[in-house]
Image (spheres, rainbow, N blue to C red):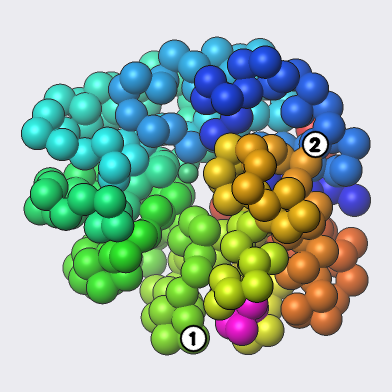
Amino acid sequence: MQLIDTHSHIFVQEFDVDREQSIARAAEVGVSKLLLPNIDSTSISRLLETAQAYPDVCYPLMGLHPTSVGKDFEKELEIIEDWFSRHKFYGIGEIGIDLYWDKTYIEQQIEAFTYQIRLAKKLKLPIVIHARNSFNEIFEVLDRENDESLTGIFHSFTGGENEYKRIMSYGGFLLGIGGVVTYKHGGVDKVIPLMSTSQIVLETDSPYLSPVPNRGKRNEPANLIYTAKRVADLLGVDIHDLATATSANAVKLFGLNPKE
Ligand SMILES: [Zn+2]
């Protein structure tokens, strides 16, 4: 069984003590590839070091995270964009709008999100969207910017039936399902049964959002197995079939080599 963790910040400091062992533990349960979404200019060196140390496991994405959008976001975007001519990246992420912590830079967040979507269309790369308390704002941008070439993932999807249907209507998007699906009051467990395996990828968002039974602890890619089990139960499919389908979805979206 092969699983792909489509969203893992394994390059952050929380993994400095046991990054190697975390990757080994993931491999033991079948998690053989990780997509690594960038955060901002300060995380790039760690991101690239990790991707270079584990070239057959870790695939880097480049982008500016919405919670890192501030006064200097244009400078940040310049640094991010410059990297695409210097290194191979498998997508643009993570990008989006986060109005949970702070609404001060909402206009700048919308501008940075829009800019990076246009960059994705130009570079023909998928995007990884972070949406927190911001579905309406995200949909407004996508209504303007979506076209038949745009593809990506709604990372850590926790919306309801309406959001699910709206996302599917854009045509090129998958739903990233993470640890919240194992939480008692997570809510997304009610929507999963409406989905098909062709619409889903699995993710941990390590080091955040650990699934039950490890909720509250640092998350790591090996925990993807708990999320996979829960999603397979909710869909009424065999976990091996879910693994095959979701891995194929990730391989296709990011243009990964399936044999590695
Ligand atoms: Zn993330």
Residue at 71% across, 40% down: 221
Q: Examine the residues drawn in magenta and state their main secondary structure.
A: helix
In the image shown, does 231 or 150 lie closer to the viewer?
Answer: 231
Q: Badge 2: few (under 14), some or many (20 or more) residues near its Cα, within 10 Å?
A: many
The x and y percentages for residue 27 are 84, 35
Question: Where on the picture, by quarter, is residue 184?
Answer: bottom right
Residue at 33% across, 29% down: 40
In the image shown, does 5 or 189 lie closer to the viewer?
Answer: 189
Q: Badge 1: few (under 14), some or many (20 or more) residues near its Cα, within 10 Å?
A: some
Residue 66 visible from this viewpoint: yes
Residue at 43% across, 32% down: 38
Q: Is residue 179 above or below residue 79?
A: below
The amino acid on which the numbered mark 1 sits, given as a three-letter code, is: Glu
Q: Considering the numbered disc 1 on the image, is that residue within a helix, a strand or a loop? A: helix
Tell which circle, 2 or 1, labels the residue nearer the N-terminal end: 2
Q: Residue furthest front?
A: 216
The x and y percentages for residue 181 are 64, 67
Q: Is residue 31 above or below residue 44?
A: below
Q: Is residue 124 above or below residue 230?
A: above
> Which residue is under mark 2?
26
> Which residue is under mark 1?
161
**Residue 201 lies within the magenta run:** no
Residue at 64% across, 29% down: 58
Q: Considering the numbered disc 2 on the image, is that residue within a helix, a strand or a loop? A: helix
Residues in magenta, as a range: 188-192
The amino acid on which the numbered mark 2 sits, given as a three-letter code, is: Ala
Question: Where on the picture, by quarter, is residue 239?
Answer: bottom right
Question: Where on the picture, by quarter, is residue 21?
Answer: top right
Q: Is residue 134 above or below residue 117?
A: below
The x and y percentages for residue 170 are 39, 74
